[in-house]
Every structure is written in structure tokens, then in C-alpha cells.
């Protein structure tokens, strides 16, 4: 799940998790791709240190699905604390939505 910050846990997208990579950005040479090379925009002074890999991204930003999740992390794995039964809703998402290439 991708959750919008400061929104009572509004789900803006769901995807099927594949893997993640810890990024290695050195002072002289980057072992992994830089933010710029990945096309990532970062308005803070902090670099993002993880690349998340996933398939089948569904944009749900207009669906008004709220998890009531509170916290600073915008990418979450589903668990039973979520106020939406995502396994049930996911069947409808797949049935009535199209996979999004980018958001």
C-alpha cells in the first residue's frame, strides 16, 4: 500500500511487492543509480536509501479508501490493523481498475 501523508491513512495506490535494494551512493562513485538517474525528485536534504521494486501498480487516489493508519511511513505492508479488508477489496480493484504505469 502507498499511503498519503497526513490523510487518516488514505490509500493512493496498491502494488505487488517484489523486492527492495539498499542504495549505495558513495562520495565519489555511486554503485547504484542516483536520484537523478532514477528520475526521483527529492525536496529534502536527505537522500532516499532504498529502491522498492513492485509489479501491478493500481492508482487508487480517487477511491477515498482510508485505513486510519497513523505514522510517517508512506509505504506499508498490509496487516490486520488496516481498517479496510484489503484482500477482499483487492479483488475489486483488479476487476474494475487498470494497472498504472506511472502515477
Image (cartoon, helix red, strand yellow):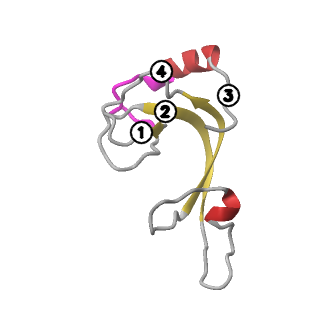
Answer left or right for 38 relative to 85. right
**Which span of residues is magenta-colored?**
78-87
Q: Residues within 10 Å of mark 4 (few under 14, many from 20)?
A: few
Q: Residue at x 39, y 24 (%)?
A: 84
Q: Secondary structure at mark 1?
A: loop
Circle 1/circle 2 CB separation < 8 Å: yes
Q: Determine the main secondary structure of the stretch shown in magenta.
A: loop
For the image, the number of numbered tags is 4
* Residue that badge 2 annotates: 12
Q: Is residue 86 magenta?
A: yes
Image location of residue 77, percent across then percent down: 46, 41
Which one is earlier in the sequence, the residue at label 3 or at label 2?
Answer: 2
Q: Disc 4 on helix, strand or loop?
A: loop
Mark 1 residue crowding within 10 angstroms, few (<14) / some (14–19) / many (20+): some
Q: CA separation, marks 1 and 2?
A: 6 Å
Residue under pointer 4? 63
* Residue under pointer 3: 99
Front residue (pair 47, 85):
47
* Disc 3 to disc 2, C-alpha distance: 13 Å
Label 3: element kind: loop
Q: Residue 97 shows which numbered tag? A: none
Alpha carbon separation for disc pair 2 and 4: 8 Å
- Earlier sequence position, callout 3 versus callout 1: 1
How far, Cα to Cα, is label 3 from label 1? 19 Å
Q: Return the residue found at the far front.
A: 43
Which callout, 1 or 4, points at the residue further toward the start of the chain?
A: 1
Q: Is residue 8 left or right of residue 88?
A: left
Residue 57 in the image: x percent, y percent?
62, 34
Residue under pointer 1:
4
Amino acid at each position: 500500500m502507498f499511503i498519503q501523508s497526513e490523510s487518516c491513512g488514505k490509500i493512493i495506490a496498491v502494488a505487488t511487492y517484489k523486492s527492495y535494494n539498499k542504495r549505495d551512493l558513495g562520495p565519489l562513485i555511486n554503485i547504484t543509480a542516483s536520484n537523478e538517474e532514477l528520475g526521483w525528485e527529492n525536496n529534502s536534504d536527505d537522500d532516499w536509501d532504498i529502491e522498492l521494486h513492485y509489479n501491478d501498480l493500481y492508482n487508487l487516489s480517487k477511491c477515498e479508501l482510508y485505513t486510519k493508519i497513523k505514522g510517517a511511513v508512506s509505504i506499508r505492508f498490509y496487516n490486520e490493523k488496516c481498517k479496510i479488508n484489503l484482500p477482499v477489496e483487492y479483488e475489486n480493484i483488479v476487476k474494475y481498475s487498470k494497472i498504472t504505469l506511472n502515477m
